[in-house]
Image (cartoon, helix red, strand yellow):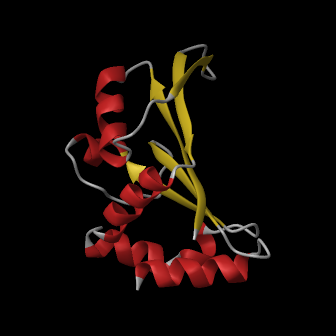
Amino acid sequence: MIHNISYRVFVHGTENEEKVLGALNTIFPYASPERELTEGYYKNKVIIFHQKFNKKKEIKNFLENLKELEPDSRNNIIDNLEKKMDDHGNLFLRFSKQDAFFNKWKIVEHGDSIHTRIKFAAYPAKKEGALKLARELFD
């Protein structure tokens, strides 16, 4: 059903790196992210953590937690599946860093979040097949 799951999260100069990693571990308990140091627009330090999961155990754990989302976040995904999925069967979700720090999963629309990509195993890799799988996941 799922090929892989990947994430990216940005740590801005005003944020505590350890707190962001704590938030990340709420969403991805198996996280061992790669760390990339870069510069923001105003030459400020920005750290990017990213990783891709291919193992069944990690994917299964994530999906079990995803199914337990609070109704508001769950309905947000279901109502916006077509907008959140690209033509190649990738579902893009954003989780609140602040809520994740407090061990809550909350879907948000803003950029200051844990950016997640779920690649559905639809053949052929088209949006229609992936949408069907995503709907089954949330039913």
**Quadrant of the rendered structure where residue 127 is?**
bottom right
- Which residue does the image show at 61% across and 13% down from the upper left? 43
Residue 98 image position (x, y, % from top left): 29, 42
- Which residue does the image show at 51% across and 47% down from the upper left? 115
Q: In the image shown, does 16 or 129 lie closer to the viewer?
A: 129
- Which residue does the image show at 29% across and 46% down from the upper left? 100
- Which residue does the image show at 55% across and 34% down from the upper left? 50
Where's the C terminus, which quadrant? bottom left
**Quadrant of the rendered structure where residue 23 is?**
top left
Q: How many marks?
A: 0
As drawn, 92 above or below 52: below
Outermost left residue? 102
Q: Is residue 11 left or right of residue 89?
A: left
As drawn, 36 above or below 134: above
Residue 109 image position (x, y, % from top left): 47, 58
Residue 70 image position (x, y, % from top left): 26, 69
Residue 45 image position (x, y, % from top left): 53, 15
The answer to whether residue 62 of the structure is visible from this angle is yes
Outermost right residue? 124
Where's the N terminus, which quadrant? bottom right
The answer to whether residue 16 of the structure is visible from this angle is no
As drawn, 72 above or below 64: below
As drawn, 89 above or below 112: below
Q: Is residue 21 left or right of residue 6?
A: left
